[in-house]
Image: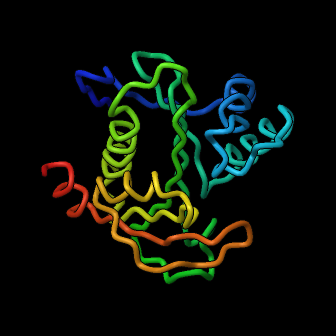
Amino acid sequence: MSTTDARTAALTFRPLDPFKDAELLHGWVTHPKAAFWMMQDARLEDVERAYMEIAADEHHHALLGLREGEPAFLMEKYDPAHRELVGLYEPEPGDVGMHFLVAPTDTPVHGFTRAVITAVMAHLFEDPATSRVVVEPDVGNKAVHALNEAVGFVPEREIRKPEKQALLSFCTREQFAKAVAA
């Protein structure tokens, strides 16, 4: 999948390699701007182990997002009937959970994070089996709430997860199409 925008160039995806990409990811997930990723104190081995577990999990996948071929963001997708949200809501067929993290940079590009979430959503909806994307960001993460709304997410309710108070939100294929067309 590729998305092109004059400000952000081509955005593509590749499977994350827990061994080759661990050092890169370690710098991203421990950066102060990634506080909501909850890996601030992670050691390199912790990051490698976490992504090895994801690579071995049939219900959780990690993809590295590339901008003009260079790593620029991380996307995770998961089956909420088996991971993250088990027992916290009633999953529907076609639900896919999602997390994304944009790499920290000293030279931010205006509109890039919105282009990333748009590309992530388009990638998820490329699978005809995906009918709805589910997210559960921290209630305090106002920036991601605004981004989620921009691509069509509708908050349902707050839920308590072991690690955080989260805002459970959903976006259907139709809501996404309407939001990006606007």
- Vertical arrangement, residue 44 with respect to residue 127, above or below: above
* Nearer to me, 94 or 103: 103
Q: Position of residue 83 (x, y in %)?
A: 63, 65
Q: Residue furthest left?
A: 182
Q: Quadrant of residue 64?
A: top right
**Which residue is located at x 45 percent, y 31 percent?**
13
For the point 60% across and 58% down, the residue is 59
Q: Which image quarter holds the N terminus? A: top left
Total numbered labels:
0
Colour mode of the rendering:
rainbow
Q: Is residue 127 above or below residue 154?
A: above
On the image, the x and y values in percent for residue 36 come to 63, 52
Depth order, front residue of 10/179 = 179
Q: Please, is residue 86 above or below residue 40 in the view?
A: below
Give the image location of residue 181, x and y in percent.
13, 49
Q: Residue 149, located in which quarter of the rendered image?
A: bottom left
Relative placement, left or right, of 29 versus 80 is right
Q: Residue at point 53% right, 81% down?
A: 89
Residue shown at 68% from the left, 38% from the top = 32
Q: Can you give x and y, in whole percent of width and height, for residue 180 in the image?
A: 20, 49
Q: Is residue 125 left or right of residue 59?
A: left
